[in-house]
Amino acid sequence: MLVVMGGSAAHHFFNKGGLKFMETNVKAGSTENKAKKSRFSSQLWFIWLCLLPVIVLVLTFTYYPVVRGITLAFQDYNLMHVKNVKFIGFDNFKTIFHDNQFILALKNSLKWVFYSLIAQFILGFILALVLNKPFKGRGIYQGLVFYSWALSGFLIGLIFKWLYNSQIGVINDLLLRAGIIKTRIGFLSDPHWAMFSVISANVWYGIAFFAIMLLAALQSIPGELFEAADIDGAGWLRKLFNVIIPYIMPTIITTTLLRVIWIFSDPTLIYSMTNGGPAGLTNIVSSFMLSKVFGNGEYGLGSAVGIVMMIMLMLYTIFYLFATKSEKAGDF
Amino acid sequence: MGVTKKSKYLYLGLATTVMAGMLSACGGNSNDSSNSGNTNNAAQSNNAGSTQEKVNLRMIESLTSPARTELLKASIKRFEDANPNITVELISPPFDQADNKIRTMLGAGEDLDVLEVRDLTINEDVTNGYVENLEPYASKWADYATVSQAAKTVASIADKPYFIANGMYERQMFYRKDWFDAAGLAAPKTWEDVYNAGKKLTDPSKNHYGFSFRGGPGGNGYVDAIAQSYNGTNLDEADGHFLKDGKTSIYGTPEAKAALELYQKIFKDTAPADSINWGFAEQVQAFTSGVTAMLMQDPDVIGVLNEKMEKGTWASTFLPVGPTGKTFYGIGAAGWGMTSFSKHKDEAWKLIEFLSSPAENTAFCKAFGLLPIHSSASEDPVFQEGPYATLLEMNTKPEDYIPLKPNYSYTEIGDWGDVVMKNTQAWLLGQASLDDTLKILDKYWQDQKAKLAK
């Protein structure tokens, strides 16, 4: 306050007996400040106390596993000989990058993510556009379409495994009966079909996610925009590319970002359908990690794969957000 | 802040409840165990089992199947009736994940008293100090005298028993007798016969195939079997992956190449393409559902075959032999062991002893389809006829059907199944040559041997 008043004004203030007044005020102020401070500090400990369960939960279940996982990646930690655990530097990383199966899993992961995402997005978007128009029984239809998202990936994998079974699977049976094929196709064993088969199951699984999210975004587009487009004589395609897509772009960016991360890191479908086989042709990085940990008990190697996955996803996220330049990503 | 005194107490109460909940959830097991530990100490000080203090045993099985779990539960019920102060909590993880679950529980030191140890896991369990040496208990057990030598050998390391087998696994060949008769074929005796008969019976248009091939998990047992048969008398019976010279692995010989060439023909000409991924369930199901004509399996499938197939449509025969007229088979077993950190060791042994008694073991093996561990039980008429008869008869010809002694010296072969599966799949699909595949398999065992020598 004194600084703001400047030198002469302050002098005048003191000469006019303002000092006494101020002293009284300062005293009163300091008592008030002390009271405020003590109230604030009593509220502060209360805030921390209320936050404590969450802090403990996050530290225990998020940060501790991350730190432990990073530590394991630099250890020779194998369940076959847990009494002989030792730090081995970057050996686990060297091992996985010299493993042809890991390189194959990396390539497969790119195919797996790319084709799954494209098909899920296009089909999910079409579904959302269809469901955006009111028709009789839309609610029931929506429920039926979206239920796949409520199922466990493992269960979906088992269902598709039996559908694609070459001996007793429905798909082979229907194709044979329709005369489309003459001999049964080993959808999950033929190197030419295996990846396509697991991707198709993943597409079916993920369509509902895009349909739900994009439908919500479509329903938030103001009707005036379409009216204005109609007045300008815009056709359906023009509306799609000049009104709909720009308006829901933040949702598209966020959903595709999230979906890539989920598809990349979710091994459940692969694990239940082919377990990465035949000959690792359907193995993706996350199922490769699972096989190292649960198949061979090689927690050190598995953790090293996990670190590589984490770095890849971080780089992807930074690059993607930078490339899309969307400061509105996440704004549904 | 705008927080009233009332809501402040409310938040505080909520936070305390959440914390208390978390702490009790985290500490639940240890509290239980410490309580039960005290109970056990009390029980021990009063001569174990003689007090009315309740003891809860935690037990986990590995070779889970619904039918087997029911049999186990019935046995446990009889045990609990006979020992009212002991209750048993049976954990039955799905078969495919059971060993990993057990491994994880042991690694985390979770409360566990009795576990199913397998011939495949005994080595790591003992190396890691997870399982208790049962010698002090077995030496006082009267019925241990009738346990067969094979059952004792497979469950021991350095002559110390670490589990009591609950049944013996020994492969033989099951075949569709009706298909063989209709085609005028005799039961296969050699691996060549398996191929020739399989090829004749294969008709993809009818969805009929010759052989239940297993290219997925567990397929290494079949690759080993054919390679061992073809190496014949050169094989070291005490170290089944090496020849008698102690240096050459079974995959480093011209015989192994001939064996795997035939193995590839069996896959291509007599088995469905899907079988490259098949594990136990698919392999057995293909046989029971009338897709395949031959199945090489342990006797634990006998129950399923009896249940799902018409009598007279199938029969059993000996294992196929190699060109020298000899074949080798491992005697497998799983059984009940005790964790080294169990707080209820006396009660745990009581349960193991009960489940392994001649009456319980014979009933379990009869119902599930295993060879009993007590020599006295083989006199039972059930084991003298049908599929068991061929198995027992095969055992009477050890000059041609040679049992392999379990070798637990290799401590790091847990990934052998995975190595065989991925490399043989690549070769069978034409993505790798046989020579390269053999080199990989040979190198694996040479590396293991080198580690052993260190």
Image: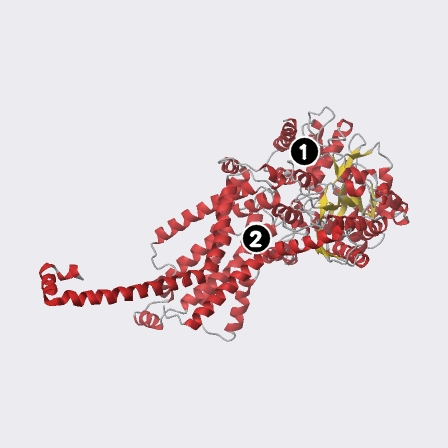
Kindly tell me whether residue A295 is visible in this rendering.
Answer: yes
Quadrant location, the C terminus of chain B: top right
Write down the quadrant of residue A12 in the picture: bottom left
For the residue carrying disc 1, how many other residues have a C-alpha within 10 Å: few (<14), some (14-19), or many (20+)?
Answer: some
- B349 and A138: which is toward the camera: B349
Q: Give the residue at mark 2.
A: A268
* Closer to viewer: mark 1 or mark 2: 1
Q: Which image quarter: residue A324?
A: bottom left
For residue A260, the mark is none
For the N terminus of chain B, give its image quadrant: bottom left
> Label 1, label 2: how many angstroms apart (C-alpha)?
32 Å
Crowdedness near tag 2: few (<14), some (14–19) or many (≥20) residues, C-alpha within 10 Å: some
Observer able to see residue A107 = no
Left or right relative to A252: residue B424:
right
Give the residue type that dot 2 points to. Thr
Q: How many marks?
A: 2
Tell me the residue at 37%/60% (across/down): A250
For image coordinates 40% across by 57% down, the residue present is: A253
Taking depth in this image into account, of A242 and B344 the one nearest to the observer is B344
The residue type indicated by label 1 comes to Tyr
Pointer 1 residue: B410
Chain designation of label 1: B
